[in-house]
Image (tube, rainbow, N blue to C red):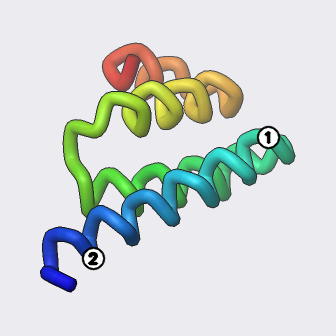
Amino acid sequence: MTDAANAVDQARAHFAAGNAHFEARRFDAALTEFDAALALAPGWLSLLANRGAALCRLARWSEAVPAL
């Protein structure tokens, strides 16, 4: 497996973990996972949207608006 493919797999795993945390209302943990995924796959639109949603749930509006 190439480094790029491994990074994509890791990003997907962080994305899935972030979604699970979000659904469980653990928004800080979701944000951590989304940030980890974005470090591996910058610009992934679904990640950016989910990160923005987590920031909204945390009432971190000044960070959420640019993320969305």
Q: Residue at x 21, y 84 (%)?
A: 1
Q: Could you classify mark 1 by the number of other residues whose Cα lies within 10 Å: few (under 14), some (14-19), or many (20 or more)?
A: few
Residue 4 picture quarter: bottom left
Q: What residue is shown with label 1?
A: 23
Indicate the amino acid at tag 2.
Answer: Asn
The vertical placement of 34 against 23, above or below, is below
Q: Earlier in the sequence, mark 1 or mark 2?
A: 2
Above or below — where is 10 with respect to 23? below
Identify the residue at horizontal 21%, vertical 38% (top origin): 43
Q: Give whichever of 5, 66 is nearer the camera.
A: 5
Image quadrant in which the C terminus is located:
top left
Q: Give the residue number, with chain letter if any, for mark 2.
A: 6
For disc 2, the neighbor class at 10 Å (few under 14, some 14 to 19, many from 20) is few
Looking at the image, is mark 1 or mark 2 nearer the viewer? 2
Q: CA distance from mark 1 to mark 2?
A: 26 Å
Horizontal and vertical percent position of residue 7: 26, 70
Q: Secondary structure at mark 2?
A: helix
Whole-percent x, y for residue 29 in the image? 66, 57
